[in-house]
Image (cartoon, rainbow, N blue to C red):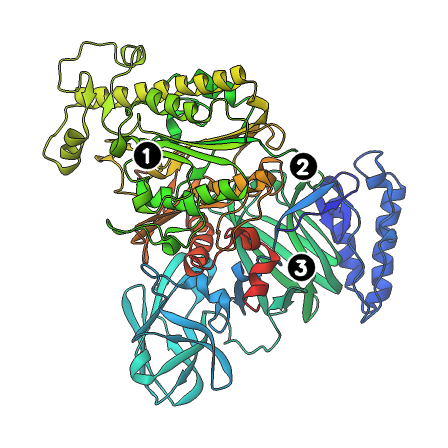
Amino acid sequence: MSEESRTAPRRPNSLIGSQPVCSPRAALLARSRDRALAQRDRRAARRRWLAIVAAVAAAGVGCGDSDAQSAPPAARAESAPGAAPAPAAPRRVEHAVYSLVDNRLAAHVTFAGGLWVPLGSRRATKYLRFRKSDLPADLAVDVAGERAARPHGDVLSLYAPLTSEQATTAAEVWVRVHADRGGPATLRVNGADAATVDVPAGWSTAAFAVPAGRLRAGENELALFGARRGGFAFAWWQVGGARPYDESAPLGGPAGLELTADRGLAWYVVVPDGGALVIDGAGPGCTINVVAHADRGEPVRGAVTDGGGAVDLSALAGEAVRLDLTLDGCARARLPRAALTVPGPAPTTRTGPPPRYVILWIMDSLRADRLRIINPKARPETPHFDQLATEAAVFRQAYVQGNESRVSHASMWSSLYPVVHDMLSPKAKLADKWFTIDELAKKAGLYASGETGNGYVARKWGFGDDWDAFRNHIHEGGGLSGEDILSRGLATVEGRRDPWLLYLGTIDTHVSWRAKEPWISRYDPEPYRGRFGKMASGTVVDKIAAGAIKPSPRDIDRLRALYDSNVSYQDALVGKLFDTLDAWGIRDQTMVVLTADHGDELLENGKIGHGVSVREALVHVPLVIYYPPLVPAGTIDEAVEGIDIMPTIADALGVAPDDNWQGASLLPLAQGVGRGYPTLAFVSHYEKKHAGRLGRWKVHAAGAKAELYDVEADPLEQRNVADEWPIARRAVEDALWLLRVYNARWRKARWGNPANVTAAFAADLGE
């Protein structure tokens, strides 16, 4: 995820080696090259080929008069045998947004045409599936001199993505296996037994025949039974290919990627707008073949030779692709740099004065799709949010980490994923050992005040003992309307000369839903004589959720209008807040963070309320941050999470992050650093089910069961398209399961996002 700029003339459409060639002339030059290089004296032939290109350029056969097209290709340095490869020729002004080297553990290894799974490496995590936090095997352990995986039970299952060609041609699955005592092992493929093999004691490579038609393009479940009885461990599995794996060359490390004549690498990635794949260091005589396949349309193909070059992928912008790299022309090549790039110089961060005042406002149960700044088709009128969006950062893909108040608040308060803070059971409390928002305020020297209508956000549940003033309106009174909470909260800090932090927790969009004028009359102007005329109480909504009350279609319209009227009501309170800051003369000194703890389902899928699913209606929430000195106005499409809020406030205040925090500051992202490539947003449903969203694609995962939704085309998540879009599914799942495996250890500030990690990730894992 490194950022670097490369300054050069504009990028051509086709490249041969590292030299740009115009599309209309590419075929002509390629034929000339092939004829020249077919000669026995390859060095002399290469000189003849370069002379041809130089002659074409000198004759004006190009794309115009730019320096990029008239520069002679012979300017590219030749490399003597054994010498370091020449650097790639300069290109456009661009910067990297996804480093294949940093993300090397996300690569799938191909060997002799098959899929090779190195179970002695952390690369194997993306092939595992499990529930809760129970990994099925210990990975990368030493077994009789080889790195291997040791299963925890009688069976080890891997979930392998195959191309159409791999699925069609694979006749065997080879397994490098160590047996403590020896014995039979049975391979099951996609739910049916394929073959049984007697495995001797010690290390051996077993071949399991696979019946024709058993494997399929896309995801495949491979299960090997007999692990405990035989005391088995596995160094690698290989699905298909011309022969089993027999290489000792390393897979690559921080110094670069390693390709061989038989071993390639493939990533499931999303092509950014204007994206290109830039490769340096192919080596003399080496050609890196690049193929980008999407689930629809034609693939993009290209090649990079010798010192390096680039392949334009912009025709697939926005698509999830399988990006394959294979090697021709030499036995082995190391690529010190391989990255997806986008046009423009690398963004940089800026500094500014810290805010003197901070307001964190959590609007309980507010769905993101009810705000026009996120969903332009939303019905509720929100003029104050609309105006604020012209002055603030709007994060369009913000996820909470739980689908109900306790879990999501705990993650926001502590910057921890649910698997770590463990506030999952009904009686769970946020542990005192976690550093929370009130402690952050005190560490920054701020007066800390809080007013909330959420009954769970209270001291007894672990939500802070360091507040200077705190009132829970459910337990201590004071009124439950947003007006009550906002007015009382502002009163606690009015006139204070010392800096302060104010937390507000309003619950108007949480049941009970009370009709708010004038909006209810606008959103439901037709006569209504049902039971929800002025209110839908929590008790009644619970009965609807349980099936004891079945609302009519007219009732459902009214319920949604009630909810929407409260969206507009809270928007009016946002206007009042900023009017107050203006009246106090402190608007420019105040950082305001507006978000929600979850949303509510409104019977779109037959469910109402929250805490029951991982659909967008529950986990996709608004996140708006206002503080112009550090946060430029604009919309950010990269995904962010509730655990990022506290690190962001700390960063703005100049407070060092706590060592336990798993989130990361959003200030760099708001300023442009880290944009250009989609990131994963993650949610947990009590650690029983999880979901991850990458751009438009979202996976619901419960153990090995996975569903894929295109949430742009299908925002209500009603059509599972996992079998129709296997590449998109795998792009999400690779990131999702990487996070699942390392969820308890993940630190975004060090490792980045699971869909786009930093160099520290593989290094910290010893790879």
Q: Which sits earlier in the primary sequence, circle 2 or circle 1?
A: 2
Q: Residue at x 13, y 34 (%)?
A: 543
Determine contact: label 2, label 1, CB under 8 Å.
Answer: no
Mark 1: few/some/many CA within 10 Å (<14, 14-19, 20+): some
Pick whichever, 618 or 174, lies toward us: 618
* Amino acid identity at mark 2: Thr
- Label 1 sits on a secondary structure element that is loop
Residue 204 appears anywhere in the view: yes
x and y percentages locating residue 32 in the rendered image: 78, 53
Q: Would you say 710 lies left or right of 281 here? A: left
Q: Quadrant of residue 93?
A: top right
Q: Would you say 442 lies left or right of 180 here? A: right
Q: Nearer the viewer, mark 2 or mark 1?
A: 2
Pick whichever, 7 or 446, lies toward us: 446
* Amino acid identity at mark 1: Leu
Q: Which sits earlier in the primary sequence, circle 1 or circle 3?
A: 3
Q: Which residue is mark 1?
A: 716
Pick whichever, 411 or 608, lies toward us: 411
x and y percentages locating residue 137 in the rendered image: 38, 71
Marks 2 and 3, how far apart at CA = 42 Å
> Total of numbered circles in the picture?
3
Marks 1 and 3, how far apart at CA = 42 Å
Label at residue 288? 3
Q: Nearer the viewer, mark 2 or mark 3?
A: 2
x and y percentages locating residue 612 in the rendered image: 25, 42
Q: Quadrant of residue 475?
A: top left
Q: Which residue is mark 2?
A: 351
Q: Is residue 483 above or below residue 711?
A: above
